[in-house]
Image: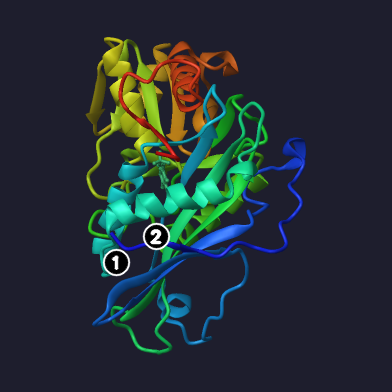
Amino acid sequence: MQTITITKTANPKQKPDPAKMGFGNYFTDHMFLMNYDAGEGWHNPRIVPYGPIPLDPSAMCLHYGQEVFEGMKAYRNAEGEAVLFRPDRNMARLNISNERLCIPLVDEKLAVEAVKQLVAVDEDWIPQGKDTALYIRPFIIAVDPHLGVHPAEHLLFMIIMSPVGSYYKEGINPVKIFVEQEYVRAVKGGMGFTKTAGNYAASLKAQEKALKNGYSQVLWLDGVERKYIEEVGTMNVFFKLGDEVITPSLEGSILGGITRMSSIQLLESKGISVSERRLSLDEVVAAADRGELMEAFGTGTAAVISPIGELIVGDRHIVINNNQIGPVAKMLYTELTDIQNGRIPDPFGWVVKVRG
Ligand SMILES: *Cc1c(COP(=O)(O)O)cnc(C)c1O
């Protein structure tokens, strides 16, 4: 494996007040960089002081969106050691995104090592306090100074980090979700299963509309029939109809979340089976009419588990579980965050120490 060189800053920044941190507003003292040049491959992995990078105005990522990213978190365990949650899964998914966007694959082990070393260098940036973490953002951009649509020959892999509090101002309280029936996020054959900037650009219009009306996020329906449930904003989604826990199956337009995967494993370990299948909006509304829409929640690294208290379908406002967090969502939130923060043993081998 290539050696990562480390250059430390001479001017460490002041850390933000954890109570006022919000999400994604502050960045740590260091960042990771690695270059790709055709013929040379990925090279020069390095940790340097955080700061602006020179970028040619013709850099292809700015014009054609050849970009991929990841999102993960570092936590402190009960002993105060810095830990990561399933970082190998993030880097495996990074390569799934890379493959779709014609970005040269990265060495997943080196990428995980880069995260570990960067977190170790900025370890004192992992905030203390409930619902806080150090959010880690690996990303790759095409930097060829060139106008013309083709896969890049020069790319930059970077990792930046941000101490964060709750993703939603509501915290773990239920959110209102608007079912989007006009705009779509992704279609099968497109890039929906990747984490790439373009998917989020496509989502802004609907997100803006939802926010204006007082809702936190949108529920996306499939782009072809506008019938089947896909995701909630930047989270995967689970419903409990009667006794059945259901999450939409991954068929190309949905992002395969690591929190989704872990939630399924956790539920199954407790004897609760999860149906991964197509789930239509009609089926959910019909269940609500029968009084069998028991719970709904989103899953994702940023918010972990986000209960849905109200679903807005056209002019209908469907209140779920009296606008309270349900037992399945609550159990998942508690177990996942307890495992991540080392408050309970990790029977799955998901938690990885940053040092050693
Ligand atoms: C990142 C993301 C998720 C959640 O994935 P996790 O690995 O659980 O964080 C879900 N949907 C979309 C669109 C995402 O970008």
Q: What residue do we see at 31% from left, 27% from top?
A: 349
Under mark 2, the amino acid is Thr
Q: Is residue 127 above or below residue 266?
A: below
Report the amino acid beneath label 1: Leu
Horizontal side of residue 200 vs 261, given as left or right? right
Q: Residue at x 25, y 16 (%)?
A: 273
Q: Is residue 315 visible?
A: no
Q: Choose between 79 and 255: the one closer to the eye.
A: 79
Q: Is mark 2 within 8 Å of ligand 1?
A: no
Ligand 1 position by quadrant: top left
Distance between the Cα atoms at labels 2 and 1? Answer: 8 Å
- The residue where tag 1 is placed is 101
Tell me where residue 123 appears, x and y as whole percent: 58, 43
Residue 163: % across, % down: 63, 44
Count of marks, rendered view: 2
Give the residue displayed 65% in from the left and 37% down from the top.
127
Pick the front one: 52 or 32: 32
The residue carrying mark 2 is 196
Q: Contact, CB < 8 Å: mark 2 with mark 1?
A: yes
Residue 239, x across and y down, in percent: 38, 24
Q: In the rendered view, how is the structure colored?
A: rainbow
Locate the N terminus and report the quarter of the image it occupies.
bottom left
Q: Secondary structure at mark 1?
A: loop
Q: Quadrant of residue 141?
A: bottom left
Q: Is residue 191 visible?
A: yes
Q: Name the residue nearer the viewer: 181 or 125.
A: 125
Q: Secondary structure at mark 2?
A: loop
Quadrant of the frame with the C terminus:
top left
Q: Position of residue 136 (x, y in %)?
A: 50, 49
Residue at the spot 60% in from the left edge and 49% down from the top edge: 162
Q: Earlier in the sequence, mark 2 or mark 1?
A: 1
